């Protein structure tokens, strides 16, 4: 079932849209303010977003441009003003479509379905282009976040995966624990850099044949780590 997000301040309109979309078997989430809607749009994975332009806090244009900075989720803009259409076109914000109020719920459902199938066709073609890093017996699928060692799949936690991938993408470069901590944990290094040591140890247990003689991640004493190629 596809998850959709409706950002709409008019409760009756939001409810009507939600009811019709649910009848078509969509899973629908509604937010009535721009800020809350934007927050969820960025944080969660929706298949499509129905975005009203006139909202009490931040408008739909601003929300859309913030979403587009990081996501390609299809967005259907909803406008009460005919003038907005020119603005939507002019801004080139990457809206997938727009619909003007008043519209019939069945028209909305039809548009949503059309966009979802279009988007699925587009992304289906991309499945064959997963970003893969292969170094000797180690294979990392960055897109699917999976790792194989000599053909055998190994399970990695999120941070272990991020750390391994970062090192493998930047081979022959020595990174200090402090640098790795800041890059992978994305915060000022006020935390414990021993976390890095622990994660390196766990990664080695999964990818190295002999952890006392590592073939992939080398310890550079007094400095940090380096991925060998
Ligand atoms: Ca509105």
Image (cartoon, grey):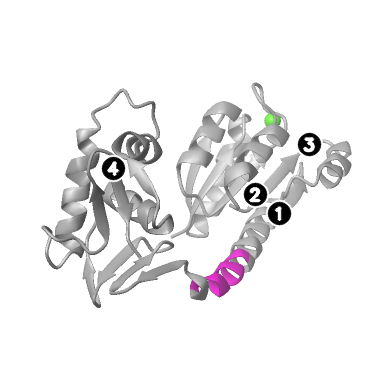
Q: Which mark is residue 75?
A: 2
- N-terminal-most mark, 3 or 1: 3
Q: Is residue 84 left or right of residue 15?
A: right
**Magenta includes 18?**
no
Give the distance between the C-alpha atoms of the residues marked 1 and 4, in whole angstroms: 47 Å
Tell me the tag on residue 96: 1
Of callouts 2 and 1, which one flags the residue occurring earlier in the amino acid sequence?
2
Query: Residue sitting at 19 percent across and 60 percent down?
Result: 214
Image quarter for residue 143?
bottom left
**Of the residues tagged 2 and 3, which is closer to the observer?**
2
Q: Along the line of sight, which residue is nearer the eye, 160 or 78? A: 160
Local packing at callout 1 (Cα closer than 10 Å; few below 14, some 14-19, many 20+) is some
Q: Is residue 51 left or right of residue 174?
A: right
Q: CA distance from mark 2 to mark 3?
A: 16 Å
| Circles 2 and 1 in contact, beta carbons < 8 Å | yes
Q: Is residue 121 magenta?
A: yes
Label 2 to label 1: alpha-carbon separation:
5 Å
């Amino acid at each position: 079932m596809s998850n959709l997000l409706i950002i709409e301040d008019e409760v009756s309109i939001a409810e009507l849209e939600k009811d019709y979309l649910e009848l078509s078997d969509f899973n629908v989430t509604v937010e009535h303010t721009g800020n809350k809607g934007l927050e969820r749009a960025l944080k969660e994975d929706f298949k499509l977003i129905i975005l009203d332009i006139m909202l009490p806090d931040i408008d739909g244009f601003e929300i859309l441009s913030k979403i587009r900075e990081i996501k390609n989720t299809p967005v259907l803009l909803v406008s009460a003003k005919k003038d907005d259409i020119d603005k939507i076109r002019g801004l080139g914000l990457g809206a997938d479509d727009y619909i003007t109020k008043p519209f019939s719920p069945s028209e909305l459902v039809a548009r949503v379905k059309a966009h979802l199938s279009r988007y699925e066709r587009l992304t289906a073609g991309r499945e064959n282009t997963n970003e893969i890093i292969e170094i000797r017996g180690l294979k990392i699928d960055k897109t699917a976040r999976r790792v194989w060692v000599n053909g055998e799949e190994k399970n990695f936690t999120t941070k272990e995966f991020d750390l391994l991938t970062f090192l493998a993408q930047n081979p022959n470069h020595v990174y200090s624990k402090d640098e790795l901590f800041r890059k992978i944990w994305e915060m000022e290094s006020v935390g414990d850099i021993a976390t890095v040591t622990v994660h390196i140890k766990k990664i080695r247990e999964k990818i190295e044949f002999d952890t006392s003689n590592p073939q992939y991640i080398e310890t550079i004493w007094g400095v940090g780590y380096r991925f060998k190629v």
